[in-house]
Every structure is written in C-alpha cells, then in structure tokens.
Amino acid sequence: MSQAAVPTILSRPSVNALSAPSVARLLERSAEWNLACSEGPLGVRVIDAGIDALGSVAAGVAITGICMGGLGEVRLRHGGDSEQWPTWIDVHSAQPVLACLASQYAGWSLSASKEETGGKKFFALGSGPARALAGREPLFEELGYRDQPGAACLVLEVDRPPPEVVIRKVLRDCGLEPHQLTVILTPTTSLAGTTQVVGRVLEVALHKAHVLGFALHDIVGGSASAPLPPPGADGGEAMGRTNDAILYGGRVQLTVNTDDDKARALANDLPSMRSPDYGRPFADIFREVEYDFYKIDPNLFAPAEVWVSNLASGRTWHAGALNMPLLRGQWLQEA
C-alpha cells in the first residue's frame, strides 16, 4: 500500500473528544487519587499528579488512558509467582497507531529560555491528545491526522509547572482558549509519573516499528504489558527504572496485515536485545553517555519480547525474551 493511502486515518474519531470523559473522571476523583487541581497561567486548568501532590498509581492508570487519546484500554494486573514481580500494567488498543503515535508519544518539544521565564529555563516534551491539535511534529504529516479544535489535554513529565510563555505557545498552536485546556503534570519520581511512563510500553514498540521503516498503516492492533516498579528516589533512578521496565520487562503483541516476510522481519528486528547496549541497567548507560539521549543506540528503545501476528496468513512470529533477573537485581532488596 502506498503512502497515499495513509490519510484514510482522517475518518477516525477525535482523540481529544474521546479522552475528555477520562479527564473529567480524573477531576471528579482528584481527592481520592491524591491530586491537586488549580488554575494555572492565563486560566488554564492544571492537575498536579506528583509535584506537590502525592498522586497515585490509580491516577497514573487514568492518565495513561488519557495519553492514548481514549483509544486504549489500561489496567493493573497482579502477577503470579512465575512472573517474578507483583504488579504489571497492561495496555491494549484497536487503533494503536492513532493512540500511541498521534496522541501518547512524547514528541512535542516545549521550551523557554531564562529570559522568557524570568528565572530558570524550562524544557518538556508534551504528550497526549493536545499534540494532535498542534501538529507541530513531522510525524503528523506522515500519519495524515489532525484533530479538530475543542477541549484538549496535554501531559508534561516535569517537576515544576510550565511558565506562562509555554502555556501561551500551547494555546496558540492548538487554537484553544484558556478554559479549553487541561495540563497534567507527572514527574517520573511520582507514583502517577512512573505508571504513565511504563504504560507507554506499546507506544515504544510502535515507535521502534516506525524507526525500522515498517508501514504504520499495516499495524492494526496491539497489546502489551510491563512490570510496574516503585518510583525511584531521584530523577535519574526514576528514569532508569521506567526505561528498564520496558527494555527488559516489556512484552508486546502486534497484529499486522502485510506479507509474511515483512511480519517476520519486524518480529526479528524489534526487541531491545538487538541493540549492542542491551544487558545493562539504563541508568548506567545514560550516565556513560553523559546524559545525552542522542548518544544511545536507538535500537535499545524497544520492548524486551515481541510477538507479531499476521492477519494475511494467520502466522505468528516471536523474538526476544524478558530479563526479570536484571530487573529484580535493580529493584528488589531481599528480606
């Protein structure tokens, strides 16, 4: 199928409209889920899910669903003894390309200089359905998708609220009035932040498939799971734990509609073990490259275990494996 066929995704529903009920539920249960809701710069709604508020895993599950534009099913699961970790997060989508790449992917670069903020410079990668309004990333041209203006939600993985200059940019690029925008703040060191990052396990697989050049319109379904660690004590440890959960504990099944050679190649090339950096904790790798993501082999950013099922033939291919001993060695202190 040619690239010209991709814009049929335009007929699909609004990720912002579909996620709006989950945003409303987050507000309704804010006290139960230890969230703090307030009026931010210019009058936008801000939900603190882990900076000054404690937040919760339950909030993180809900935020994961919001990030997926209402097109994903997200739940917690208690793992049995054979899975070697007590709590797992499961995600599924019948529209994985739209849910993961047009909404959940943290691809919108938002920054402000010290001069613009009147203090510290600010940088964040925006994720969630508001991205599909702004369409600032080249990826949206490839997907052939833009959402229609209306109430919208943006998720920022940050440890402080965004300054007014960043909020102005978001409103301008999305074509929104302040009362239409909700911004959710989820530092990785929080319960909600850790949960929503590990909940990106399917999105990581979709992004790796895109990097490999696989035709995105041939991916028609996806399910994934990953173990959920407690948050790290600081930003570096938290980032290491959430990445390790996917790189060494992520399991993904993609349903595709293509020829068998392409399906087999995707299964073979997708797992994180195809990277020469595989086998060491992410925090150690990150430290060695002086905290520069662009120096890390991009093939590492992938789930540990992959199953690819081809609708065209009924065949399934499997590659990779979970590495629970590495995770337990990082996360578990024996009694």
Image (tube, rainbow, N blue to C red):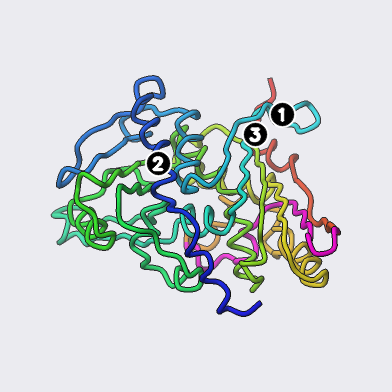
Residue at 45 percent of width and 28 percent of height:
56
Nearer the observer, 300 or 22: 22
Amino acid beneath label 2:
Pro
Q: Nearer the viewer, mark 3 or mark 2?
A: 3
Residue 131 at least partly seen:
yes
Nearer-N-terminus badge (1/2):
1
x and y percentages locating residue 207 in the rendered image = 58, 62
Which class describes the residues within 10 Å of circle 2: few (<14), some (14-19), or many (20+)?
A: many
Res 124 quadrant in image: bottom left
| Circle 3 SS class | strand
Q: Quadrant of the N terminus?
A: bottom right
Q: Residue 79 carries which label?
A: 1
The residue that disc 3 covers is 88
Queried whether the magenta region covers residue 335, the answer comes back as no
- Is residue 84 shown left or right of residue 287? right
Q: Measure how far apart labels 3 and 2 are at the Cα level.
A: 20 Å
Contact (CB < 8 A) between labels 1 and 3? yes
Nearer the observer, 110 or 258: 258
Amino acid beneath label 1:
Gly
| Circle 2 SS class | loop
Question: Count the marks: how many?
Answer: 3
- Is residue 104 shown left or right of residue 147? right
x and y percentages locating residue 98 in the rendered image = 52, 57
Residue at 50 percent of width and 48 percent of height:
68
The residue that disc 2 covers is 187
Which class describes the residues within 10 Å of circle 3: few (<14), some (14-19), or many (20+)?
A: many
x and y percentages locating residue 93 in the rendered image = 61, 48
Q: Which mark is residue 95?
A: none
The stretch in magenta equals 292-314
